[in-house]
Image (spheres, rainbow, N blue to C red):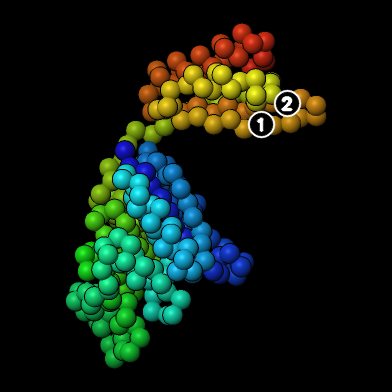
Amino acid sequence: MHNFYSVIIGTELLNGRRVDKHFTFINQELRERGLLHVGNFIIEDSPFLIQNCFNMILQDPKSVMFCFGGIGATPDDLTRAIASEVFTGQELSLHVKAKELIESQFGKEAYPHRITMAMLPPEADLLTNVINNVPGFSLFNRFFFTPGFPSMAWPMVQDALTKHFPSQEKLLSDSFIVESPENDLIEIMQALPPELHFSSLPRFVGEKRLVEIYLAHPNKAILNQWSSFFKKEALAKGKIIKDCC
């Protein structure tokens, strides 16, 4: 099972000039395929942040990353060079096919600036841009780099997911409310197996202390087994169980 990460680069998102749409898109795409989205990062166009974010993701041997933004030709487009350094340990080089695509799209206007978008990590494979033919790129079929524009980026993501990552069984889930302080349920939580997806969310309704419990697993029998276990143990502690709304 892969661990999927999304990295969304753009100072304009953090200072409020633009509203991010990528997270909702990528999260939905992964969930519909039964794939595990373990981290999302929205960061400014900072070499320090981009490099450290990429390095962290690289340390996960199961990581797959979709990165949005920063592959253009302006001075704040830093993703290509940093990706090459982190993921290949090499400097950018001219990708002949990317050069041809950019020249075909823009003609003489490809020079002197747009052509720099053909400078890619040496081992890059191209991602098709259905809008203007300026490609995104991928490395080792694990790390995918797309433009910041949703109309360009999202078809690249969908195509990559279809080609390289077969859909998995979707998670089945059960949610319920336990009328209890969260602290009183910790021993039950500790007994749950690690392969079970679990979260607890405290709530306060007046003076009542409630906990919303979420359990998920692709196997219905396993989900039912541990959901029943949790409820039985909570009832044994004198807790009240309610359906989650």
Question: In the figure, is residue 43 to the left or right of 159?
Answer: right
Q: Secondary structure at mark 2?
A: strand
Q: Is residue 232 above or below residue 204?
A: above
* The residue positioned farthest toward the left in the image shown: 96
Where is 144 relative to 31, above or below?
Answer: below
Label drawn at residue 217: none
Q: Which mark is residue 209?
A: 2
x, y percent for residue 216: 46, 28
Query: Which residue is at the front of the view, 90 or 229?
Result: 90
The residue that disc 1 covers is 202
- Is residue 130 in sight in this rendering? no
Image quadrant in which the N terminus is located: top left
Count of numbered marks: 2
Residue at x 51%, y 59% (from the top left corner)? 42
Q: Is residue 50 left or right of residue 210?
A: left
Q: Give the percent coordinates (x, y) of residue 213.
A: 58, 26
Whether residues under marks 1 and 2 lie with C-beta atoms below 8 angstroms apart, the answer is yes
| Dot placed on the residue nearer the N-terminal end, 1 or 2 | 1
Up/down of 206 relative to 148, above or below: above
Label 2 environment density (alpha carbons within 10 Å; few <14, some 14–19, many ≥20)? some
**What residue is drawn where x is 25% and y is 49%?**
164
Residue 13 coordinates in the image, percent (x, y)? 56, 65
Q: Quarter holding the C terminus?
A: top right
Question: Which residue is depicted at the point 37% across and 38% down?
Answer: 34
Label 1 and label 2: CA atoms lie apart by: 7 Å
Identified by mark 1, the residue type is Pro
Question: In this view of the protein, can residue 135 be seen by the observer?
Answer: yes
The residue lying toward the viewer, choosing from 169 and 49, is 49
Q: Using a 10 Å C-alpha cutoff, classify the residue at mark 1 as few (fewer than 14 neighbours), some (14 to 19) or many (20 or more).
A: some
